[in-house]
Every structure is written in structure tokens, then in C-alpha cells.
Image (cartoon, rainbow, N blue to C red):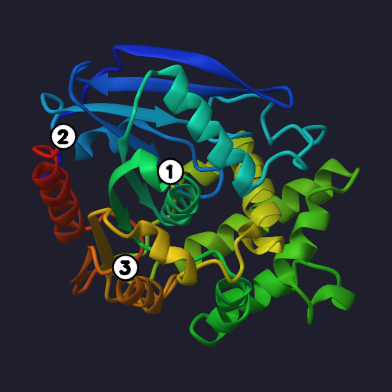
Amino acid sequence: MTSLYPDIDAYADGMLDVGDGNLVYWETVGNPDGKPAVVLHGGPGSGCNPWWRRFFDPAAYRVVLFDQRGCGRSTPHASDPTTDLSTNTTAHLVADMERLRTHLGIEKWLVFGGSWGSALGQAYAMAHPERVSEMVLFSVVEGTHREVEWITRAMGRIFPEEWARFRDGVPTADRDGNLADAYARLLESPDPAVREQAAIDWCEWEDTHVATAGPRKHDKRYRDPVFRMAFARLVTHYWRHACWMDGQLPAGAHRFAGIPGVLVHGRRDISSPIEAPWRLALEWPDAELFIIEGAGHGAGFTDMTTALVAATDRFAARR
């Protein structure tokens, strides 16, 4: 991870009222007069931690980071079972990004996102291509029913014992249906013990299906019951609805014409197979696809990090 820039502190932050009773936490780091960039975290529900700041030259960029609705420091928090998720959709997050861009007085920004953040970045660019200067996306996904089925069911062929435990976490009558939907219902149970066990089971499977390259490591964030519950509620909420994007990608990528892009994906990313960025690159001639041999899901691989920093460094000169 030596290719990352040193950690830096935010020079401004705030809570933006985006409507529907939601306050979204945002912060800016780097050079206040630098090239604007916005960071889209994964999950949905992971939140934006300081690690994301380090993909950008702090002398060249004005980097905007924010916690998407319901997670991180944004309120109300999805860990609270009374928090209504009906106004937490992809369209709402795209609108939040536009409100934040206007609030900060930014005309255009580079969109940087990974995993779920890559899908959100594509949704934003489809809606507001004139506001995107470039895109840098990694561990690229499309947010489709097909991908949800792959992760929640077909991956059982790779991890049969772990998947059997995951499947058996839902009632017998639900085991042959949509598992994301079944877990979402458990996470809405009036019984806190049922909700907690569902969150644990869901996050244990998350830990499993992303660990297809390198040593298997437990994600320490899942030890926090607040993070775990919010993450499980938000992921299942989005996945049960195919992120409200089913069929939009890669067909909608014609909207990206003229926007330079870099796609970085691990060859051994079984959680989100390389088919998605490959299909996207075919529909988006202005994008370059970099396949990182030996890397899996996420940017926690040296060659992935190097490629991402090289992309932001290259785009830093474009104003």
C-alpha cells in the first residue's frame, strides 16, 4: 500500500439537509483550489473512512467525501430499527450528490468509486453527465438481479459449507427464494434477537464471498454491532430491489461519451466477476480497463492501489 498518499485531515466538514429528514455528513480534504473529486464508498452502508482520502494528491485535488444516507455519520442511522429506508434509494443518493455539489459550489468533479460506489457513480453519470469530468471506478458492479443471485446463491458452489449456513439463516420456506429479500425481512423483525442474528449471518457471508484472493481476513468493522446492523439493513434493502438499476447498465453507458474513464478490476474478484467492467468498457469507448492479475475484490491489493493512484495522478492535470 506504499503507493497511497499520506493521510491528511479534513479542512472542512458539515451536515447537509437533503430532505426526507436526512442529514448527510460531508468533508473536504486537500487543496481548496484544487481539482474537485467526489468519493463514493461501497456497501451500500460502509461509510467513508480516512483511507479513501489517500488516493489523491492533496496538493492537486479538492476531494469531497460523504457518508451516504443511513450510514457513517449521516442521520438518521440505519442501525436504528425505526429508521425508514423507503427514501433511501439510488435515485435519492444521486440527488444527494447533486445537492452536495451545488452546496459546495463545484461545477464538475471527478467521480471515484469502488464496488457499490462504482454502480452509484455510473448512475450519477447517467443522470448528470455534464457534471462529471472523469470517472475512476474499481471492483466494478452493475447492481442487477443477476449479480445479487450470483452473490447470494451461485457463490455457494465455491463456498458450499459457508453458503449452507448463510441459507439456513432464513426460515425454511424462504430458502429457495430471494435470499436478500428474506434477510431484509428478518432485519425488520420486531424481535431484536432475530435482527441481530440476521445481521451476524449476513456479514459472515459478506466476509466469505469477498475473500477469494490473498489471505482470508475478518473485516473488523463487523464486530461493531452498530456498523453491522446498518450495513446489513442497507445492503439487503438495495439488493432486494436490484439497486433500482436493473437493466440500466451497461446499456446506459452511451451517456458517458466524452467522459474519460479508468476501470480497475481484480482478475480473481469472484464476488463481482470481471464480466461487468468488460461489458462496460465495450459500451464506453472513452474508458480504459486495467485487469489486475492476482487481485480480488476491493482496493486492498498493492497493484490495484498503484493503478488507482496512477489514474488520479494522470487526471490531476485536466481542469
Res 214 seen here: no
Q: Position of residue 256 (x, y in %)?
A: 36, 58
Q: Give residue 304's position: percent from left, percent from top.
A: 20, 58
**Residue 259 horizontal side relative to residue 305, left or right:** right
For image coordinates 49% across by 34% down, the residue present is 97
Q: Which residue is mark 3?
A: 284
Res 146 quadrant in image = bottom right
Residue shown at 21% from the left, 35% from the top: 54
CA distance for labels 1 and 2: 24 Å
Q: CA distance from mark 3 to mark 1?
A: 22 Å
Disc ID at residue 153: none
Which three-letter amino acid code belongs to the residue tagged 3? Trp
- How many other residues sit within 10 Å of disc 1, few (<14), some (14-19) or many (≥20)? many
Left-right relation of 258 to 5: right
Give the residue number, with chain letter if any, for mark 2.
319
Q: Circle 1 — which element?
A: loop
Write down the residue under mark 1: 41
Q: Tag 3's secondary structure?
A: loop
Tell me if 56 is positioned left or right of 231 in this view: left
The answer to which of 223 and 256 lies nearer the viewer is: 256
Give the residue displayed 54% in from the left and 87% down from the top.
Answer: 157
